[in-house]
Each structure stands twice: as structure tokens, then as C-alpha cells.
Image (tube, rainbow, N blue to C red):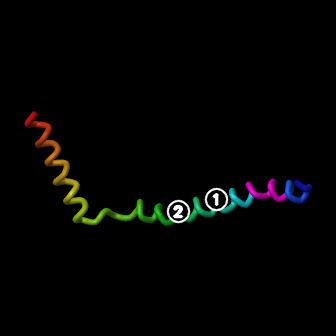
Amino acid sequence: MCKLDAVDDMKQPEKQSSVQRQIDENLRRVYGEVANSELPDRFAQLLEQLKASQSNDGNSQ
């Protein structure tokens, strides 16, 4: 391995960390918006039905 290859190998983690940082930021931006959005009424109703059925199942045991 020549000295230039060694220098290139040392730069590689910087590139990866920069790319990784960009990916992290983009994912946080996209999923942050989704996580902060309001739950649709239909999903809320389904969750309430699920909770009710689970509590009824727990009472019968």
C-alpha cells in the first residue's frame, strides 16, 4: 500500500460519517413530521376498540 492509499483510507470514515449524518438528519426530518402529525380518527377508533377487547379478554380470565 502506498502512502496515498493510506491517506485515502483515513478520509473514508469522514465521508461515511458525513453521509451518515445527512441520512440521520433527513430521516429525523421526515419521521419527525409524521410522529408529530395528528392520528387519523379511524386509527384512534380502532385503537379504542382494541383496548376495549383486550380489557374484556382480561376480565374473563
Please report the residue visible at 85 percent of the width from the left and 58 percent of the height from the top: 5
* Residue closer to the observer: 9 or 2: 2
Point out the image quarter for the N terminus: bottom right
Earlier-in-chain disc, 2 versus 1: 1
Residue 34 horizontal/vertical position (percent): 41, 64
The amino acid type of the residue labelled 2 equals: Leu
Classify mark 2: residues with Cα within 10 Å, few (<14), some (14-19) or many (20+).
few
Asked which quadrant contains residue 42, the reply is bottom left
Residue 23 horizontal/vertical position (percent): 59, 62
Q: Which residues are magenta?
A: 8-13
Q: Compared to 42, does 59 lie above or below?
A: above
Q: Is residue 22 left or right of residue 32?
A: right
Q: Is residue 26 left or right of residue 60?
A: right
Q: Is residue 46 left or right of residue 37?
A: left
Residue 21 horizontal/vertical position (percent): 64, 59
Residue 36 horizontal/vertical position (percent): 41, 61
Asked which quadrant contains residue 16, the reply is bottom right
Which label number is shown at residue 5?
A: none
Q: Which residue is mark 2?
A: 27
Q: Main secondary structure of the magenta part?
A: helix
Q: Compared to 40, does 9 lie above or below?
A: above
Please report the residue visible at 82 percent of the width from the left and 59 percent of the height from the top: 8
The amino acid type of the residue labelled 1 equals: Arg
Name the outermost residue toward the front: 1
Name the outermost residue toward the left: 60
What SS does tag 1 mark?
Answer: helix
Disc 2 to disc 1, C-alpha distance: 10 Å
Q: Is residue 26 left or right of residue 52?
A: right
Queried whether the magenta region covers residue 4, the answer comes back as no
Is there a contact, CB below 8 Å, between mark 2 and mark 1?
no
Q: Which residue is mark 1?
A: 21
Name the outermost residue toward the top: 61
